[in-house]
Amino acid sequence: MTKANRRRRIAKKLLASTALVGGALSLGFGGAFAQFTDTAAAGPQTISSGTIAIAVGPTNDSATGAANVVPGDTIGREIDINSTKATANAATITLGFTATATSLLDTDPTNGLQVSAQACAAAPTRTAGPPPTYTCAGGWTTVDINGATSASVAALETTPEPLTPLNSLTAGKQDYLVFTLTFPAGAPGNLSQVAACSGVKAGTAATENLEGCSSTLTYNLLATQRAAGAH
């Protein structure tokens, strides 16, 4: 091999080595570039949902019945309401009725039972009776039923209505209430004309008789949450 050929061969090897080193350097630098970074965290933020809860008590005389009532009679029973286990306020508490035994007493909106409610600022003095009676030292205040002082049981069986004002709309509060059922003085009854507990609703002595009727009522109270808002 001539000197010229040897020089050409060595030059080719040097060029190949340089290309390999250059490629390696290019790969190395390509993976070595870095970026400045930073992180920040906010929180932790705890989110909890509220509780709507109402109960009856401490006094609940709703299971105390009444027998042999006649038109004009009243049946007063203390049924306290509390929201002591609630954590969120309610917008409304409605009153409704269901009847497991039903009759004209609870289905006739005119001649059947009417209900009203009163509140005492503190627990009233209760006399067991029978019938139980209640005395409010500070005086009674009227609780409206859908804006009226009374409503028929028949109407409330179909559509429960709000009671106002009530302390127990606010979580942790309670109300001392006496609900009074009134048998209207004008309720008709004449066995010589109409059979016992029969006839047309809102009738007269010639068409309706509320004698001998029996209804078993349950008071239904429903609390509904306040309006949604921002927190």
Image (cartoon, rainbow, N blue to C red):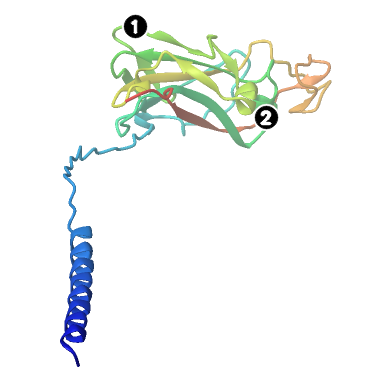
Figure check: 38 above or below 81: below
Left of 91 or right of it: where is 198? right
Residue at point 69% right, 31% down? 103
Amino acid residing under circle 1: Gly
Left of 126 or right of it: where is 31? left
Q: Observer-nearest residue: 36 or 17? A: 17
Figure check: 51 above or below 193: below
| Label 2 environment density (alpha carbons within 10 Å; few <14, some 14–19, many ≥20) | some
Image quadrant assignment for residue 56: top left
Q: Quadrant of the C terminus?
A: top left
Figure check: 27 above or below 50: below
| Label 1 environment density (alpha carbons within 10 Å; few <14, some 14–19, many ≥20) | few
Q: Observer-nearest residue: 86 or 38? A: 38
Left of 37 or right of it: where is 196? right
Numbered mark located on residue 73 in the image: none
Residue 105 place in picture, x, y as percent: 65, 25
Numbered mark located on residue 139 in the image: 1
Q: Observer-nearest residue: 99 or 72? A: 99
Sequence-wise first label, 1 or 2? 1
Amino acid residing under circle 2: Cys
The residue beneath circle 2 is 213
Q: Observer-nearest residue: 162 or 124? A: 162
Residue 6 place in picture, x, y as percent: 17, 86
Residue 32 place in picture, x, y as percent: 17, 58
Left of 164 or right of it: where is 43? left
Tell me the mark number nearer the camera, choosing from 1 and 2. Answer: 1
Q: CA distance from mark 1 to mark 2?
A: 34 Å
Specify the farthest residue to the bottom: 1
SS at mark 1 in the image: loop
Q: Quadrant of the N terminus?
A: bottom left
Residue at point 19% right, 83% down? 4
